Amino acid sequence: MKSLQDPVAVLKGVGPKRAADLATLGIDTVEDLLTYYPNRYDDVTPADLENVQDRQRITTQGTVVSEPLLSHFGYRRSRLSFRLQVGPRVIMVTFFNQAYLAKRVALGQTVTVMGKWDAQRAQVTANKFLSAGDQEQADSGAVYSVNKHIRQATLRGLIKQAFDEYQNVIPTLLPASLRQHYRLLDRRTMIKALHFPENVGQAKAARRTAAYEEFFLFQLRLQAIRQARRHANGDRILYRNDELKEFIAGIGFELTGAQKRVVNEICRDLREPYQMNRLLQGDVGSGKTIVAAIAIYATITAGYQAALMAPTEILAAQHAEKLSRVFAGTHVHVGLLTGSLTAKQHRELTGAIKRGEINLIIGTHALIQDDVEYANLGLVITDEQHRFGVNQRQLLREKGAHPDVLAMTATPIPRTLALTAYGEMDVSVIDELPAGRKAIETRWLKVDQQSEALHFLRDQLATGAQAYIVSPLIEESEALDVQNATDLYNELVEYFQPHYQVGLLHGRMSAEEKEQAMHKFQRGEYQLLVSTTVIEVGVDNPNATVMLIYNADRFGLAQLHQLRGRVGRGDRQSYCLLLADPKTDDGKQRMKTMVETNDGFVVAQRDMELRGSGDVLGSKQSGMPEFKVGDPVGDLKMLQVARQDAADLLRTPHWDEQDDNQPLVLYLQRHQLETHFD
Ligand code: ADP
Ligand code: MG
């Protein structure tokens, strides 16, 4: 029996080499091939030659009226030309370096070609041969994204072959009720129209079905997982409310309304008998750490352990230091598990964790990957969730633990989108900054205004403030980044000595050296800290009030916003200075956006507009999955509708017993386990 799960090797012309080449595009099965959709379509309707612009790309169709002439020149270069009668006109068609086409063109034949129009010479410099004669099926103009291993034509040929052989076993996944409701195509028609449309309109209609299908299946998977989790057994963490209240009262500041709300949401989850899986989203500086501390404290009053995972050792060390202070005098015992422990220290610490003597364990993701064994882990919190590439929940399950999970992130993706994208998580949002915060003043200076920036810095330092200085980013090379930071450091030491002390922080330093540098900055022994972007996330020194960023246009908006978030964390006026001479419009827009707004959600929206959602959401940073067809920003409405439809279906009693839903049941069985979100 033919199945869409057949490996591509079943196709004619696919041996081990070609199968490996296809795998580089993520194509392993026939289904992968059939759902490898074109990313655009060339317009293949013949142009009206009287109405086209010089140098425009056109498709034209006509009769060959001169013997095709093939000439070779240079090294492996060739030219094929012939005259073509198009309506009343005769034009010249020339192909370069496609000598093999000579066999397909003959006098008197009707051909369709695509290329660039040269109005003056009435000539098409063609690069695409669409068809010759009526018996040959016309190229639909579909353009696939390929790489150096696979050519367009090869891929198209294989897709054609796969479709011809498998079209009768393509199941339609969407139930008839939904297809009728939204006037969607069945899957076979959709796939055919996406790859071989008769015209661009047909491809567009098919794309609509494909986008809905993709969103619907995605949401169905997420929500099925969520539903399963709700039925699964988790531990009830019955924390001591009186103790928790006392702890909160002793924090030293009043929680914001938003913090109170999310604390309540989290506490409710802890008490429930199912496993919490909650995303805590809040802009930089909104006070996520104290919320984490409260959740940790609650968990520990119930007799469980908690773990806090940070993406960098610097951040883990900072959390350990701050939380040790927050929890001083309580029965919370903090252990910091880092790579820089000696073997003996490591052994002692993991021993204490296993015996339950340490009940708050802080570290990087080594916390759940290593051989660390817990006495009774009740809660795992990940800080800066978007920085983690691995699916930690999966890892936790493999270790046999099923603690409640709280993932914290500042990644500002628009709220509606977060709710939709993290369909399998519950989402809490802190949408309020602590009272008394002054808006950070952001200024954009030209590079030749560096001395003004330094003067400004000097004045600020004179008032007792501290400052971060971020050196230019060189994408290609960490070594160059380090060199840059070091040069800048030397320059600034010279400039500010002997009055102010400057520290240096970069990715090539050992964990210990980094920690030392951060420590001295936190304690005020350094007034200035020169750094590469290693300080981008999480670092909290409320006394730092100036962030100076060199060549700021090299950074993306999300990153600039994160960097800026290192200041403005106390009640003093803070500043962010961007030194940049952007060469592109995008670069200018980014600087302007930073000057105009402090709101992470607005920044995120602008970022998406400038870069296109694919870039923002496709990157690991956001945690969003990549969709093949649907655009979660452009098609947000559709994504929301699909989300609702998936929820409605799952809520229908015995939905999984109805005939029409069997393809979906099978689909879920096949895809549930391989779902990754973080
Ligand atoms: P982020 O959400 O970026 O992780 P942090 O948790 O590091 O932010 O908090 C930023 C700063 O604000 C910290 O110095 C923290 O002590 C302080 N803070 C948090 N909540 C409040 C509050 N409700 N009132 C005053 N200061 C607060
Ligand atoms: Mg933080």
Image: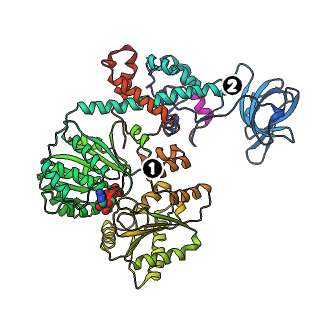
493 above or below 169? below
Q: Is residue 52 magenta-colored? A: no
Which residue corresponds to mark 1? Answer: 601
Q: Residue at x 38, y 73 (%)?
A: 466
Q: Which residues are magenta?
A: 148-158
- Circle 1 Cα neighbour tier, 10 Å, few/some/many (<14 / 14–19 / ≥20): some
Horizontal side of 544 relative to 610 (left or right) equals left
**Between marks 2 and 1, how big is the CA–CA gap?**
47 Å
Q: Earlier in the sequence, mark 2 or mark 1?
A: 2
Q: Is residue 152 magenta-colored? A: yes
x, y (%) of residue 488? 48, 74
Q: Residue at x 41, y 80 (%)?
A: 462
The local secondary structure at tag 1 comes to: helix
Work out which quarter of the rendered image holds the C terminus and state it.
top left
The local secondary structure at tag 2 comes to: loop
Asked if disc 2 and disc 1 are in contact, CB closer than 8 Å, the reply is no
Residue 238, disc: none
- Circle 2 Cα neighbour tier, 10 Å, few/some/many (<14 / 14–19 / ≥20): some
95 above or below 170? below
Foreground pick, 394 / 575: 575
Residue 138, disc: 2
Q: Amino acid at mark 1?
A: Phe
Horizontal side of 106 relative to 349 (left or right) equals right
Horizontal side of 411 relative to 110 (left or right) equals left
x, y (%) of residue 357? 11, 55
Q: Residue extending furthest top?
A: 659
Q: Amino acid at mark 2?
A: Ala
Horizontal side of 197 relative to 495 (left or right) equals right
